[in-house]
Amino acid sequence: MLAFLEEMSRFIFLEDVPQKADVILIPGSNQGALADTAAKLWKEGWAPYVLPSGKYSKITGKFAGERFETEWEYLADRLLQQGVPKEAILREDRATYTYENAIFSREVTDAAGMEVKTAIICCQAYHARRCQLYYQVCFPDTKFLMCPTVTHGITKDNWFESEDGRKRVLGEIERCGSQFHEIVKNAAHK
């Protein structure tokens, strides 16, 4: 693989070995496999709670999947089907994009009186860097462990081989720059 493709892959695709955490976070998505990954980690005892987040995509204005009104409902149902009890599933159903997933998830953990020292994020593999960056802004004192799920068949090793893979990964790289202008500007003034 060309060096610049390897660099882009290293930047976007993050993956950690799970460790004990306070919560497992799932940014909003219509990809049920994210909830499956989170349920597996919960059943293995990595964290006592799972917090799926999401209303629907800001772009579409509705949830793109099945019989559910929100991403949270869909992901929570998938967690329940995988054996995660209702008491272990926290609720955030207002977010319409990744930064709101992080903002509103922080509100949920604060309202529950949770001190989140370590968190696991279960996101799409090609979405890992941007998720980590947004959640780190909202949980500045938290250690994040990225435990992503491959979706759409897009991996660190093959994303550049298909039009869909290139579009998704290069779009993530663009958004990592374009969506952080205000955050970086605000941080510079502190």
Image: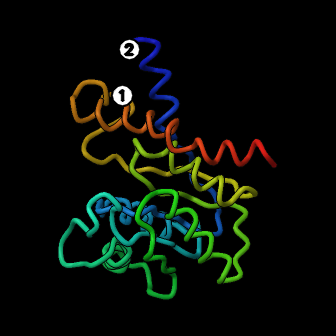
Percent x, y for residue 5?
Answer: 42, 19
Q: Which residue is the site of mark 2?
A: 1
| Relative height, residue 167 to residue 17 (above, below) | above
| Relative height, residue 97 to residue 171 (above, below) | below
Picture quadrant where residue 115 is located: bottom right
Looking at the rendered image, the quarter that the N terminus falls into is top left
Element under disc 1? loop
* Residue closer to the observer: 143 or 37: 143
State yes or no: discs 1 and 2 in contact (Cβ < 8 Å).
Answer: yes
Dot 1 or dot 2: first in sequence order is 2
| Mark 1 crowdedness (10 Å alpha carbons): few <14, some 14-19, many ≥20 | few
Q: Residue furthest left?
A: 66
* Residue closer to the observer: 103 or 15: 103
Percent x, y for residue 135?
Answer: 59, 56
Q: Which residue lies furthest to the right in this view?
A: 190
Q: Say which mark, if any, is on residue 147.
A: none
Percent x, y for residue 40?
Answer: 43, 65
Kind of residue at badge 2: Met
Picture quadrant where residue 172 is located: top left
| Relative height, residue 118 to residue 17 (above, below) | below
What residue appears at the point 50 percent right and 64 percent down from the top-left corner?
101
Kind of residue at badge 1: Asp
* Residue closer to the observer: 18 or 136: 136
Tell whether 90 sits left or right of 170: right
Q: Say which mark, if any, is on residue 157.
A: 1
Picture quadrant where residue 37 is located: bottom left
What residue appears at the point 43 percent right and 46 percent down from the top-left corner?
127
Element under disc 2? loop
Percent x, y for residue 167?
Answer: 29, 34
What residue appears at the point 49 percent right and 51 percent down from the top-left corner?
147
Q: Distance between the residues labelled 1 and 2?
A: 9 Å
